[in-house]
Amino acid sequence: MFKKFSVLILVLSIMILPGQVLAKDVDASQKGKPTKIEYITTKNSEIVPLLYFESSEDANLYRQQKMENSKSLQYSPIDQNTNQIGAMASEGFNYLGYAGVFAYDYQYVYYRNTTTTEKKWTRTIQRGSSSKTSISVNAEFPKVFKAQVGVEFANSTTFTDTFEVLVPPNKQGEIWSWNDAKWYNWSYTSCGWFSCSTSNFSATRPTDNFGYEIYILDFRDPSGGA
């Protein structure tokens, strides 16, 4: 009981701290790790980590590892022997199972402080995410998806928030955002005159939950990481 109470106090204290707070040094010898972590509070009262990186390579490795970890999904296949699966397969689509939630549709904005003094960067972000399949599908797929999953496949969601970041002199600030989307595994079988072929694909449906992090590092092109 004592441990749970202590954790609750820590969480509440984090939620009420304004601005850039809770600086935490990290072992800089570890590749792909930030050298320091702080937190800011957005206009919507979201607590966002502010990550300082020694190099662009460390920032790229950190994000790659984060994406890989989010894609280590708990794959849940469904019973391939049910009558419903047979009906769906007759349309060419076969539902293989729900794979979980992962970081989807990364986007970024950035600001370069080319002065010799610290600057406040205020940025309002408006963005959204929409449903997507990893291959082209025909008009039958949304019908099959709803029959199997129970919700419409087509879905779009948006968010707006304002961030205020103190960017050190001769450093760059980057706001990275993504959607915590649901991933479903499918296969599609098409048949010609003499044979059939099957392709596995994923169907991604965004949720109302967005995630964000802020990087502080040397000047670079975020699209190429250099």
Image (cartoon, rainbow, N blue to C red):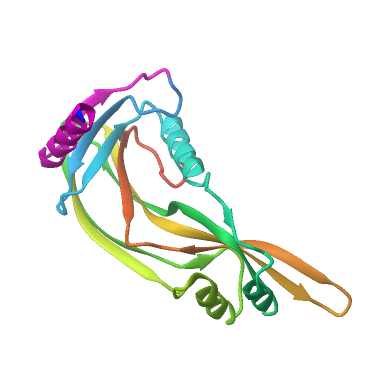
User: Does residue 165 appear in this view?
Assistant: no
| Residue 159 drawn above or below residue 92 | above
Residue 200 lies in magenta, yes or no? Answer: no
Q: Residue at x 43, y 21 (%)?
A: 30
Task: Tell whether 108 sits left or right of 160.
Answer: right
> Residue 119 or 100: which is nearer the viewer?
100
Q: Residue furthest right?
A: 194
Vertical order, 191 against 67 (above or below): below
Q: Quadrant of the C terminus?
A: top left
Rendered residue at 61%/74% (across/down) = 137
Residue 59 appears in the picture as rendered: yes
- Left/right placement of residue 71 relative to residue 222 reads right
- Is 221 positioned to the left or the right of 16 in the image? right
Residue at the spot 38% in from the left edge and 70% down from the top edge: 156
Dividing the picture into quadrants, the one containing residue 220 is top left
Residue segment shown in magenta: 2-29
109 vs 158: above or below:
above
Q: Position of residue 64 (x, y in %)?
A: 48, 40
Q: Position of residue 55 (x, y in %)?
A: 40, 28
The quarter of the image holding the N terminus is top left
